[in-house]
């Protein structure tokens, strides 16, 4: 564990931001340090991520803006 001193206004701002995200100050700072975006770490549950990845991995038309290998190499054997 590490401790450090912060100006009262900085500590209050951190508490407010962490609270707004539904996190403790420790979790908020860990999310910033490890992921860069505390919202990204807390927005999607593991089950939601699994469903998202399953949906994205199904066969069918390519999502908008992407091309399948067959579309890219349609002029090759």
Image: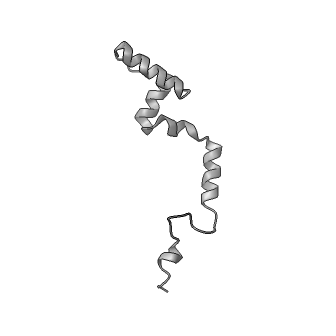
Residue lying at the far top of the rendered structure: 8
Which residue: 51% across, 36% down? 39
Which residue: 43% across, 36% down? 34
Q: Position of residue 61 (x, y in %)?
A: 61, 69
Query: Is residue 61 rendered to the left or right of residue 1?
Result: right
Q: Nearer the viewer, residue 43 or 65?
A: 65
Could you say which quadrant of the image residue 47 lies in?
top right
Residue lying at the far front of the rendered structure: 64
Q: Is residue 67 above or below residue 46?
A: below
Q: Nearer the viewer, residue 1 or 23?
A: 23
Query: Is residue 57 rendered to the left or right of residue 12?
Result: right
Q: Is residue 4 above or below residue 43?
A: above
Q: Quadrant of the N terminus?
A: top left
Could you say which quadrant of the image residue 45 lies in?
top right
Which residue: 47% across, 79% down? 73
Q: Is residue 61 above or below residue 22?
A: below
């Amino acid at each position: 564990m590490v401790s450090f001193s912060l100006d009262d206004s900085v500590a209050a701002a951190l508490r407010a931001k962490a609270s707004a995200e539904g996190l403790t100050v420790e979790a908020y700072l860990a999310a910033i340090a490890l992921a860069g975006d505390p919202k990204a770490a807390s927005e999607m549950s593991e089950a939601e991520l699994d469903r998202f990845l399953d949906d994205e991995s199904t066969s069918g038309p390519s999502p908008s803006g992407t091309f399948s290998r067959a579309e890219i190499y349609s002029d090759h054997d």
